[in-house]
RNA sequence: GCGUCGGUAGCUCAGUGGCAGAGCCCUCGGCCGAUAACCGAGAGGUCCUUGGUCCGAUUCCAAGUCGACGCACCA
C-alpha cells in the first residue's frame, strides 16, 4: 500500500463529517430574486405593472421642483415598424434622461412623432387613390391622419417594450392641432423677422413625388448618363475670328459637354471662365472648334482627332460672343462664370438657368431668362422645340438623335457618375425652376447667426461641429414650400400682381393658428380668401402649398414644449433651450439643421445646448444593416427571446460614436455579462435577507476594515460612473460596472465575505458589518444600472431591504450617498495595494499546489509569508485574520530573516517583495466552517467543530476587526 | 476629388512618450453552502503599414492603406 496523500486523508475526514448536519446554524443566502431572469416572459408583466401604477407620472411627480432637464425627442417618422436603429436611438435617449434624474434633475421624456409628409401620402394613395380620383383633399388628409395614428400605435408598443420610460400617453405629434398651430406661430415669427422670401429658381424636383425636395431628402447615387459634346455654331464667324486675333471668317463651333441632354431646350448661354485660356483649333472632320486649352488634348482623344491649334484667347475675350442654339431658333451668348472648371468636359459650359443652381446664379447676373420648359408632370411644355409633350426621361434620346442629324453632336459616351436621387423613390431628380418660398440664408443674416450658434453648442463627438458648420455655411436657401396635401399649410396670402406676401402676414398667421388650434387644418384648407381678408380678397391669392416636413419637426424645440408644457413658457411665449438633442449622425443635415435654422430664424438662438450623435448599426462584417441584405436583427425579436434588458445592455456596451455592431454572437456575450451582473445583485440580496438597515446597520466608524474599504471603493467607482453618465459614455459605465462585479465583488470582496456571513452569528457585529456594506453597495448598484438595465433594476429595487416609501421608484432616485467615515481606518489605506498584490501572488502559489494535487480547495492550504518594510507592515496589520483574506485555513506573516530556502519569491507590482510558503495542512476539517484547524475535536460537546465555530454557536461569538 | 473620425487580443472596449491593459470568449483546473452559480490558472497582440522626430513611439508628426461618415462633383 502506498501512503495516502494529504488530500486523500482530507477527503476521508470529509466523509465522516457529513454524518452531522451543520448547515442549520449557518446563515446561508436566501432570496426571492431568481437566478433565471426569464426576461422575455417577465418584462411584459413588469411593463403592465408600470403602466398600472402610472410609473412615468409617479417619477415626474417625485422629480417636481428639481432643476429642469429639457430633452427634445427627435420624432421618428410615423411609417413602418421600428427597426434596430430606432431602438438604439430611443434607448440611448432613455438612458440619458434616466441618468439626468440620477443627477437630481426633473427630466421629462415627451416622445414625439413626425406625422406629415410624402411617405404617408404615398401609403394612402396606394390604398385610396390620388386626390381628385376617389376622394377630395380633405378626405385624403383624414385618411393620412388615420394612417399615421395606426403607425404611431405600433411604434409606441415597440418602444414601450424596450423599457423606455416616457410619457407615452401624451406624446407630441406634429399633426396635433396644438402643434400645427404653434408651428404657424413659429412661421409667423420667422416671417416677421423677414427671412421668408419668394423665389423662382431651380430646386430639386422629384418626378415621382411631383414636388420639390429639401436638401435633406436628396441622396446621391451612381447613375449612368449619356455624356455628349455638342457644338454651338458661332453666329458671326468674323466676330469669333476677331476675338482670336485672326483675320479670316471661317465657320466654327463652340463645344459644350453635358450629361443631361434634356436640359438643352432650356439652354440660354454658354459659360466660359474669364481667366482660362481657350483655343480655336482645327479638329479634323469637325472643323474649327473652340474649347479650353487645358482640355484640348483629352477632348481630341475623345473625338479621335489630332488638334491643330490656330489661336488662343482668354475666356474674358469671348464674353458676348453669340452662338446658334443647336435646335431651337435662337442665339445664345457666351457669358463668364467662376463655376467653370477644367475637371471634365470642354471648359465651355452649357448654361440652363432653369435647371441648375450655378446656371441660375450666373444667369441672373447676365439677365438671362429663367425659362423652364418642363411642367410639373415632367413633360415638356407645348411649344418647346423638338420635345414638346415628351417626358423628360424620354427626351435625351430624341435630342441626341436630332443633334446627330444636324451634325452638332461631336461625341457621345456613357458615363457613370453620382447623381441626386429622391431618397424615397430612389429615382433620379431633376433641377426645375418653379416659384417657391424660401427661408433666406443671407437676406437677414440667418447663415452667419446660425454659424455663431453652432459654436455655442456642445457637439458630441466634437467632429459634428465642423460637419454642421460646413453644411450651414454652404447650403442654399431653404425651400420650405411643397406642392402636396398632407402637411401644415403655408398659410399666407400672396398679392396677385406683385407676388408678395400680404403686409399683415404675421398677424394673419396668428389668426389662422387660432382657428387651426380649435378646428384643425381644414379651417385653413376649407376657407376662402374672403374669409380672412374681406374686401381685399380680390387682390390676393391663398398660397396652396404645404410646409416642408422638415419645418414641422424642425419646430419641435418650440412646438413640442408648447403642446406639453404650455404653462412653463417664458414671458415671450418661448420654450427653454433644450439640454440635449440625440440622433443618428445623418441628422446633421436633417433635423439638427432644420431645428437650428427655425430656432435661429425665430429667436436668434440655437434650440439646443448639446447635440449628441450616434452611428448606424452594422453586422459582424461591418456591413450596414438593411432589408435588402437581409442581415438585420429586429429589436422585437430580441425582446421576445433574450429580453429588452439584454438589448439595452448591448446598446450601453457599444461605443456608439462609430458604427455599432450587432450579431447573434455578440448578443450571446452580452447575455453572459447580463447574467453576471444579475447574479452579483442576487448574491447581495440573498445575504441581506432579514437585514433591516435601520435596526441592524452598523455605524460606518465601527465597520470592519475591509467593509470600510469596500464602501470607499464603491464610492470611487460611483464617481467614475457618474462622470461617464454625464458624458453619455455608457460603454464606460458598462465596463466599469461589469469589471466591478467580476473583479472587485466576485473575485474578492464577496468571496472573502462568505465566511463571515455564513458562519458568524446572525446578529453578530461582524456579520452585520458585512451586511451594512453590502446593503450600501446594492443600494448604489441598483441606481448605477437603472438607466441601462431598467427592468432588472426595478426588480432589485422592490426586493431591497429597509423601509422605503412605497411609491418612490428606483427611477426617481438620485445617487446613493455611500457613507464615509471621518475616523481613521483600522487598516491604513496604503496597506490595501500591498494586501491585494500579495493576494494575487498567493493565488498563483495555491494554483501550483492544486496542479500538483496537493490541495483542492484553498482551505486545504496553510500559508506562511515572509516580508519586510511596507509589505510586512500591511500583512502584520491584519495579523490573525490573514487567513480570511486569503481564504486559507491558516496564514501568518514572519520577518524576512526567518524565510526558509524553499519559499516562493513574488515581486509585487506596487513595490516590495513577498516570499510565500504554502502547503497542504494536516489539520482536521471543521464540519461547519470547513477551515482545517488544529483545534478541531478539542471541544467535547462539538467534536467536529473548530474552536471558532464553537464560540460562534454557543459562546459570545468570535470578534473580527479587519477581514 | 476634398474633409472628418477611426484601425490596440477571436469579441466589446480601456490606456500610455518608458516591459502592452480589463472583461468576455477559449483551454485547463478547483469548489460543491451564489450551483443552469461561484473561484483560480493559462493561452492569446507586428498596438493597420511605411517613414520621420526622439535616448526611447502603440502614443507625437508625415505619407499610405483599410473602414465609416460627410462634402463636392452632378454643367
Image (tube, coloured by chain):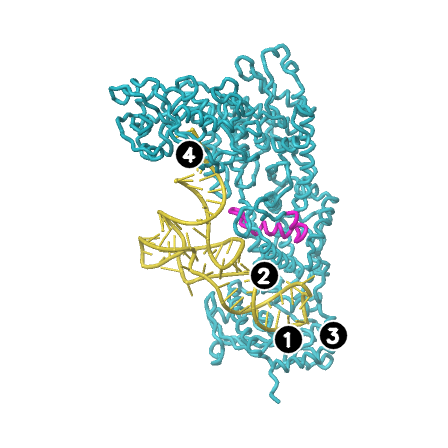
Mark 2 vs mark 1, CA separation in Å: 25 Å
Outermost residue on the bottom side: it is: A1
The residue identified by callout 1 is A931
Q: Is residue A425 above or below residue A433?
A: below
Earlier-in-chain disc, 2 versus 1: 2
The x and y percentages for residue A417 are 45, 36
Name which residue lies at 54% across and 46% down: A624
Label 4 crowd bin: few (<14), some (14–19), many (20+), radius 10 Å: few
Earlier-in-chain disc, 3 versus 1: 3
Residue A548, picture quadrant: top right
Residues at marks 2 and 4 touching, judged by CB atoms closer than 8 Å: no
Q: Is residue A493 above or below residue A751?
A: above
Tag in front: 4 or 3: 4
In the image, the chain rendered in cyan is: A
Tag in front: 2 or 1: 2
Label 2 crowd bin: few (<14), some (14–19), many (20+), radius 10 Å: some
- State which chain disc 3 sits on: A
Amino acid at each position: 500500500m502506498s501512503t495516502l496523500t494529504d488530500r486523500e486523508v482530507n477527503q476521508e475526514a470529509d466523509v465522516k463529517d457529513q454524518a452531522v448536519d451543520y448547515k442549520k446554524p449557518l446563515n446561508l443566502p436566501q432570496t426571492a430574486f431568481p437566478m433565471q431572469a426569464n426576461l422575455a416572459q417577465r418584462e411584459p408583466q413588469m411593463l403592465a405593472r408600470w403602466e398600472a401604477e402610472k410609473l412615468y407620472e409617479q417619477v415626474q411627480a417625485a422629480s417636481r421642483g428639481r432643476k429642469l432637464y429639457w430633452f427634445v425627442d427627435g420624432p421618428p417618422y410615423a411609417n413602418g415598424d421600428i427597426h434596430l436603429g430606432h431602438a438604439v436611438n430611443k434607448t440611448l435617449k432613455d438612458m440619458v434622461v434616466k441618468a439626468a434624474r440620477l443627477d437630481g434633475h426633473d427630466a421629462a421624456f415627451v416622445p414625439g412623432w413626425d406625422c406629415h409628409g410624402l411617405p404617408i401620402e404615398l401609403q394612402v394613395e396606394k390604398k385610396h387613390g390620388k386626390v381628385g380620383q376617389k376622394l377630395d383633399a380633405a378626405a385624403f388628409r383624414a385618411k393620412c391622419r388615420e394612417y399615421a395614428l395606426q403607425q404611431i400605435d405600433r411604434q409606441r408598443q415597440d418602444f414601450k417594450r424596450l423599457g423606455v420610460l416616457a410619457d407615452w400617453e401624451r406624446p407630441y405629434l406634429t399633426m396635433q392641432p396644438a402643434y400645427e398651430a404653434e408651428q404657424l406661430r413659429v412661421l409667423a415669427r420667422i416671417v416677421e423677422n423677414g427671412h421668408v422670401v419668394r423665389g423662382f429658381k431651380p430646386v430639386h424636383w422629384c418626378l415621382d413625388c411631383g414636388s420639390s425636395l429639401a436638401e435633406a431628402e436628396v441622396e446621391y447615387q451612381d447613375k449612368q448618363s449619356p455624356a455628349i459634346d455638342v457644338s454651338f455654331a458661332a453666329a458671326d464667324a468674323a466676330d469669333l475670328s476677331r476675338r482670336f486675333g485672326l483675320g479670316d471668317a471661317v465657320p466654327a463651333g463652340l463645344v459644350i459637354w453635358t450629361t443631361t441632354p434634356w436640359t438643352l431646350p432650356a439652354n440660354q448661354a454658354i459659360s466660359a471662365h474669364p481667366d482660362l485660356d481657350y483655343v480655336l483649333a482645327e479638329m479634323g472632320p469637325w472643323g474649327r472648334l473652340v474649347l479650353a486649352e487645358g482640355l484640348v488634348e483629352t477632348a481630341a482623344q475623345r473625338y479621335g482627332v489630332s488638334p491643330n491649334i490656330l489661336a488662343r484667347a482668354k475666356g474674358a475675350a469671348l464674353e458676348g460672343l453669340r452662338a446658334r442654339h443647336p435646335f431651337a431658333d435662337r442665339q445664345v451668348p457666351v457669358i463668364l462664370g467662376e463655376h467653370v472648371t477644367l475637371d471634365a468636359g470642354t471648359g465651355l459650359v452649357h448654361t440652363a438657368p432653369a435647371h441648375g443652381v450655378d446656371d441660375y446664379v450666373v444667369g441672373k447676373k447676365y439677365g438671362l431668362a429663367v425659362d423652364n420648359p418642363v411642367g410639373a408632370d415632367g413633360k415638356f411644355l407645348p411649344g418647346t422645340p423638338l420635345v414638346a409633350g415628351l417626358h423628360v426621361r424620354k427626351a435625351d434620346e430624341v435630342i441626341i438623335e436630332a443633334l446627330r442629324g444636324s451634325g452638332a453632336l461631336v461625341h457621345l459616351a456613357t458615363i457613370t457618375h453620382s447623381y441626386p436621387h429622391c431618397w424615397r423613390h430612389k429615382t433620379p431628380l431633376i433641377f426645375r425652376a418653379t416659384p417657391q418660398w424660401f427661408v433666406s440664408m443671407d437676406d437677414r443674416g440667418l447663415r452667419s447667426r446660425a454659424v455663431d450658434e453652432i459654436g455655442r453648442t456642445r457637439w458630441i463627438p466634437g467632429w459634428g461641429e465642423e460637419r454642421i458648420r460646413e453644411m450651414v455655411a454652404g447650403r442654399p436657401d431653404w425651400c420650405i414650400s411643397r406642392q402636396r396635401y398632407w402637411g401644415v399649410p403655408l398659410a399666407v396670402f400672396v398679392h396677385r400682381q406683385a407676388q408678395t406676401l400680404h403686409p399683415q402676414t404675421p398677424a394673419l398667421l396668428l389668426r389662422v393658428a387660432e382657428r387651426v388650434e380649435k378646428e384643425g387644418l381644414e379651417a385653413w384648407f376649407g376657407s376662402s380668401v374672403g374669409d380672412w381678408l374681406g374686401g381685399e380678397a380680390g387682390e390676393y391669392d391663398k398660397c396652396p402649398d404645404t410646409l416642408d416636413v422638415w419645418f414641422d419637426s424642425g419646430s419641435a424645440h418650440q412646438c413640442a414644449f408648447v403642446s406639453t408644457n404650455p404653462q412653463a413658457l417664458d414671458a415671450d411665449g418661448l420654450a427653454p433651450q433644450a439640454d440635449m438633442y440625440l440622433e443618428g449622425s445623418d441628422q446633421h443635415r436633417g433635423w439638427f439643421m432644420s431645428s437650428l435654422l427655425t430656432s435661429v430664424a425665430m429667436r436668434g438662438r440655437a434650440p439646443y445646448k448639446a447635440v449628441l450623435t450616434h452611428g448606424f448599426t452594422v453586422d459582424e462584417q461591418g456591413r450596414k444593416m438593411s432589408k435588402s441584405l437581409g442581415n438585420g436583427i429586429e429589436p422585437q425579436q430580441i425582446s421576445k427571446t433574450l429580453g429588452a434588458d439584454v438589448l439595452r445592455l448591448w446598446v450601453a456596451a457599444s461605443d456608439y460614436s462609430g458604427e455599432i455592431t450587432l450579431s447573434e454572437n455578440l448578443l450571446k456575450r452580452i447575455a453572459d455579462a447580463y447574467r453576471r451582473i444579475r447574479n452579483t445583485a442576487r448574491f447581495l440580496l440573498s445575504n441581506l435577507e432579514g437585514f433591516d438597515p435601520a435596526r441592524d446597520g452598523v455605524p460606518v466608524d465601527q465597520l470592519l476594515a475591509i467593509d470600510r474599504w469596500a464602501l470607499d471603493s464603491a464610492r470611487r467607482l460611483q464617481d467614475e460612473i457618474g462622470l461617464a453618465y454625464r458624458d453619455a459614455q455608457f460603454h464606460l459605465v458598462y465596463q466599469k460596472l461589469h469589471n466591478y462585479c467580476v473583479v472587485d465583488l466576485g473575485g474578492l470582496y464577496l468571496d472573502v465575505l462568505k465566511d463571515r456571513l455564513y458562519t458568524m452569528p446572525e446578529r453578530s457585529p461582524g456579520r452585520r458589518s458585512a451586511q451594512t456594506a453590502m446593503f450600501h453597495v446594492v443600494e448604489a448598484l441598483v441606481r448605477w444600472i437603472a438607466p441601462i438595465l431598467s427592468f432588472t433594476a426595478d426588480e432589485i429595487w422592490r426586493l431591497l431591504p429597509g423601509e422605503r416609501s412605497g411609491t418612490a421608484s428606483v427611477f426617481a432616485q438620485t445617487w446613493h450617498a455611500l457613507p464615509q467615515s471621518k475616523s481613521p481606518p483600522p487598516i491604513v489605506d496604503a496597506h490595501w495595494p500591498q494586501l491585494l498584490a500579495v493576494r494575487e501572488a498567493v493565488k498563483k502559489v495555491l494554483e501550483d499546489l492544486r496542479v500538483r494535487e496537493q490541495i483542492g480547495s484553498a482551505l486545504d492550504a496553510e500559508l506562511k509569508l515572509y516580508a519586510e518594510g511596507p509589505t510586512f507592515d500591511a500583512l502584520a496589520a491584519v495579523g490573525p485574520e490573514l487567513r480570511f483574506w486569503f481564504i486559507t485555513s491558516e496564514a501568518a506573516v514572519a520577518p524576512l530573516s526567518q524565510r526558509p530556502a524553499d519559499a516562493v519569491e513574488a515581486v509585487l507590482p506596487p513595490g516590495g517583495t513577498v516570499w510565500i510558503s504554502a502547503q497542504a495542512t494536516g489539520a482536521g476539517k471543521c464540519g461547519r466552517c470547513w477551515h482545517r484547524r488544529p483545534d478541531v475535536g478539542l471541544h467535547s460537546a462539538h467534536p467536529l467543530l473548530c474552536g471558532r465555530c464553537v464560540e460562534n454557536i454557543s459562546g459570545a461569538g468570535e470578534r473580527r476587526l479587519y477581514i
